[in-house]
Image: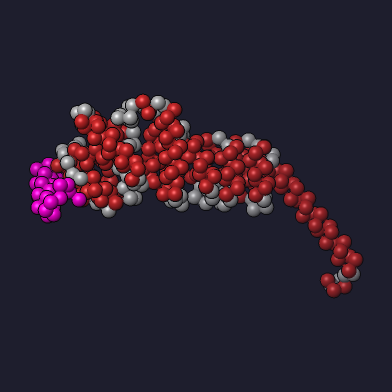
Amino acid sequence: MGRQDISPGLRLLFGAVGFMALTGCYISLAKLANDEIDVAAPLLEFSNVLSDDDLIDIVAKQSEAHRIAIAGRTSVPERVGDAIVEHGGAPSALRLVRNSQAELGKDTLHKLVARASTDVALATDLRGRGDIDWNSMRDEIGAAGQKVLDTLGAKTRPLDPVTADKVNQVVYNRMRNRAGFSAHEWKVAYNQVKALSDRRQLDERALIRFARFGYGHHSAAALTVLLEVSPEVFVKWLAMQDYVATTVALRALNLKPDLFEALIATMPWRDLPTDADKTNVRKRYEALTQEEASGIFELWRSHAFRRKPAGNERVA
């Protein structure tokens, strides 16, 4: 019997039966998705039948293992990701951040930034997300980091902010470096470094501490003072990613190669140096002798001073 031979009444009956079958199937899938993780995992990670609301409900009510499975889905909408960060533990949040297909909204990022203060792995992977506009996030990161520093009593020792060996400080400083150069942070860092220099405490040990704890602006400001160049010069190097000038200048200071590499990785460049950048810069550094670097640097310095306009009392 062909389709055209079926009466309207039968077609209506068959349609109702099909709808009931599909509905029953959906209810069964939803039930399985809320089952033990061994049963639910394939559905949570790969099924396209479950709605965002279904996933959010599972995130809120089921186990961390369920949240980990959902965080690894091919597509994780913003609402679902926010629920994972809200209800989940470190493993599910970490998998969410490592999932490049997961959408991270602004509210979600704020929560992740706050959690990263006590989770180095989360902070590291968060910095690796290329889809985050770190410039727009700088104020939020700075404010959150300042709260952490305040709770550690950092304001009582404004001239040496790197002596407290706390992971919170390291995390927030490294995240601020990902955001790039900040004029406000540079001003604060430069004044603090100058004060350290006046107290004769600006030496190699200070540079090591700055690099170790991720104080990028302090590292750059310290090198500016040690090299006796104007702040504008060093800021220009950072803005232009001028690894050549920085390599020559730091080699003239005769820093150890490991310290040089750590400072290059820490400073607030316009863009974070890649692993290839750091490898190439270190090779150039080791190939250059201190005598050669000093000669080049002094030649540049004398040329800069010779070109200084008459009547100016400082280098532009």
- Report the quarter where the N terminus lies: bottom right
Q: Position of residue 72 (x, y in %)?
A: 55, 46
Q: Quadrant of residue 199?
A: top left
Q: Is residue 238 magenta?
A: no
Q: Is residue 71 left or right of residue 212?
A: right
Camera-nearest residue between 93 and 238 = 238
Q: Which residue is at the front of the view, 191 or 45?
A: 191
- Which contiguous range is marked in magenta? 287-316
Residue 241's place in the image compared with 193, above or below, is below
At x 27%, y 36%, the residue is 191
User: Measured along the vertical axis of the image, is residue 14 above or below residue 78?
Assistant: below
Q: Residue, x 52% and y 47% (percent of image)? A: 106
Residue 60 screen position, x and y as percent: 65, 39
Task: Tell me the residue at 12%/51% (across/down).
Answer: 311
Q: Position of residue 6 (x, y in %)?
A: 87, 70
On the rendered structure, is 159 left or right of 245? right
The residue closer to the viewer here, 315 or 5, is 315
Q: Do we see residue 58 in this rendering?
A: yes
Does the magenta stretch mainly form a helix, a strand or a loop? helix
Q: Residue at x 71, y 47 (%)?
A: 29
Tell me if residue 284 can be seen.
no
